[in-house]
Amino acid sequence: MKAVFDQATFPVSIMRCSLAEGERADLGVAARPSLILVEQGDVTMPFCQMDVPLPTFSSLFVNASCRRHVRTNRDSVIVLMEFSPSLFDSSMIADRYVKPLLSSRIEFIVLSHPSSACLAQAVEALEEVRFGNELRFLSRLYDVFSMIVYEKEDILKSGALQLDPRLERMLEYMKANLDRHLSVDMIARSGFVSPREASRLFSRQLSTSPMRHFLTMRLEEARRLLEGDVESIWQVCEKTGFESMSHFSTAFRRMYATSPSEYRSRFI
């Protein structure tokens, strides 16, 4: 294994591992949550009594306390990335995504192709020997997590956390009205609960508030639309309920550490 970045003060440790064809390796128990990226080759990782195939440019999120095994089908290079949850302690992404994900009993998640591509960009950014590479790496890492949990409710349902039916009704109502200006009262009525009970349900099960969650859902939808080339940025702004481009741009940058136009440029 080769250390990609091993500065003691940096809250993410990354190692690159080269494996020969047919090699079986026990990578040990992940002391902290980790991401695994296959840079080259073709590997299989057994999890939960099933084999997870990982070809080149695919990746995997592994929750804490999981033993990581790998079996190679041909010569392969994988990148192991472990991070401290404290890295995400004070951000919207932490509250909305990372904390519920890490506190669940989900053992692993296979990342989508866009998430894997973004993770590869994060590693590349960290390997660039120039000022600011750490910030670029963290920005890409935040992008990865926001993509992983774009449909977090379904992921949590497939794991240990079952959402309250009242909360599910409110979430469905919010998803159907991303272009509207909803209030806490309107959201609460859709779940047949009081505003106070709605806030309690969101706090207990999603570690956020109804309005903060609704803002995040709108930004997630905006991100999805920006990955296509059909809608203009102004149309994306309108379809996700923002009153002005400046408000939209400010909220998007706060969430994803990039502007809507910069984000769209990655997919053109």
Image (cartoon, rainbow, N blue to C red):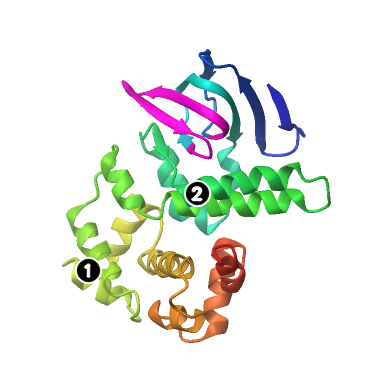
Please say whether residue 65 is one of the residues in the magenta stretch. Answer: no
Residue farthest bottom in this picture: 244
Residue at 75 percent of width and 41 percent of height: 127
Q: Give the range drawn in magenta.
A: 36-59
Q: Distance between the residues labelled 2 and 1?
A: 38 Å
Specify the amino acid type for callout 1.
Answer: Ser
Locate the C terminus and report the quarter of the image it occupies. Answer: bottom right
Specify the amino acid type for callout 2.
Answer: Ser
Label 1, secondary structure: give it: loop
- On residue 115, the disc is 2
Horizontal and vertical percent position of residue 174 = 29, 69
Residue at 35 percent of width and 53 percent of height: 151
Q: Name the residue under label 1.
A: 194
Residue at 55 percent of width and 54 percent of height: 143
Horizontal and vertical percent position of residue 132 = 78, 53
Label 2 packing within 10 angstroms: few (<14), some (14-19), many (20+):
many
Horizontal and vertical percent position of residue 229 = 47, 72
Label 2, secondary structure: give it: helix
User: In the picture shown, does residue 130 fall above or below 235?
Assistant: above
Compare residues 103 and 69 and report the one nearer the observer: 69
